[in-house]
Image (cartoon, grey):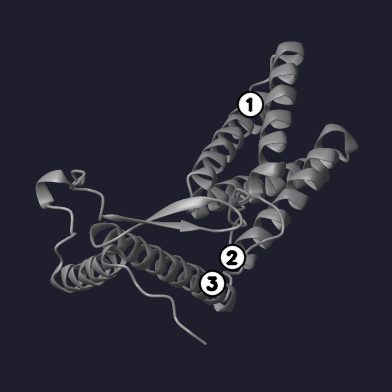
Amino acid sequence: MVKSPVSPSQSHMAVAAAQLRGSATVARRHGAFRVPSSCRWPRHPLAGSLKLSVSTSAVGGKPFGFGAKIATKCANENTRAEELNSRSDQAGELVAAVEDVTPQKRSAKIHDFCFGIPFGGLLFCMGLLGYFFSRSTVSLVLGVAPGLATLLLGTLSLNFWRSGRSSFLFILGQAAISAVLAWKYSHAYLLTNRILPWGFYASLSTAMACFYAYVLLAGGNPPPKKLAPAPSS
């Protein structure tokens, strides 16, 4: 096969193309085609402080350095708060267990003033009525005076019980008054054989004296009930 002769112009064009390819290769190796820094787009100083993470739910920023430290500190504070709460709960349970184990003080089933105040009021009113109708000093001595004293002692016992203090002396005083009245009324009943008023008063005073003796021997009035704790939210 006979090759067609190459013209001088075509040979010159091939040589020039080869030279251009060589110069482009050398320029790429030495960075001749890099964009100078003066022509580049200015970079924001905070551009490197955030990393954008794309998830299926949302796009969020992940801070470096200071933000990570704050997150770690918050997590540590939450852990400490949980530990303190658990310790306080354990201390409360321990105190409740100690209170349950502590033996309760002996006391009566009913307070002295529950019967003492009505008893004193009854004696005072009946003695006052007897004095108005009969003008007898016996009604004042055996009705008004002991009734008023019993009423006063019962009221003081109630106030001391509410404040958490002992009302032993007031119970003892009411018991003494009831015992003296029981003896006086019984003596009057034996002399007159009258059920009203001496027999009734003698029986009532004897019953009250026995009641006060029970309260004293049982250990006094029962303590006030503790307030129920508020429901925790």
Q: Residue placed at 74% from the left, 17% from the top? A: 129
Q: Earlier in the sequence, mark 3 or mark 1?
A: 3
Give the residue at mark 2. Answer: 219
SS at badge 3: helix
Give the residue pinned by disc 1.
144
Q: Residue furthest bottom?
A: 1
Dot 2 or dot 3: first in sequence order is 3
Q: Residue at x 65, y 49 (%)?
A: 112
Disc 2: CA contacts within 10 A as few (<14), some (14-19) or many (>=20): some
Asked if the residue under mark 2 is in contact with the one under mark 1, i.e. CB atoms within 8 Å, the reply is no
Residue 216, image x and y in percent? 60, 61
Task: Bin the neighbour count of mark 1 within 10 Å (Cα to Cα): few under 14, some 14-19, many 20 and up.
Answer: many
Note whether 60 is above or below 194 in the view shown: below
Rounded to the nearest angstrom, the CA distance separating label 2 from label 3 is 30 Å
Vertical arrangement, residue 129 with respect to residue 212, above or below: above
Please, what secondary structure does the residue beneath circle 1 have?
helix
Query: SS at mark 2?
Result: loop
- N-terminal of the pair, mark 1 or mark 2, is 1
**x, y percent for residue 198:** 81, 37
Q: State left or right for residue 187 relative to residue 70.
A: right
Task: Identify the amino acid type marked 3.
Answer: Glu
Give the residue number, with chain letter if any, for mark 3: 93
Nearer the observer, disc 3 or disc 1?
A: 3
Q: Residue at x 87, y 33 (%)?
A: 196
C-alpha span from label 1 to label 2: 30 Å
Q: Nearer the viewer, residue 18 or 14?
A: 14
Q: Position of residue 25 (x, y in %)?
A: 22, 72
Of 75 and 221, nearer the camera is 75
Residue lying furthest left: 38
Specify the amino acid type for callout 2: Gly
The image shows residue 141 at horizontal and vertical percentages of 61, 30
Residue at the (34%, 61%) spot, across then down: 71
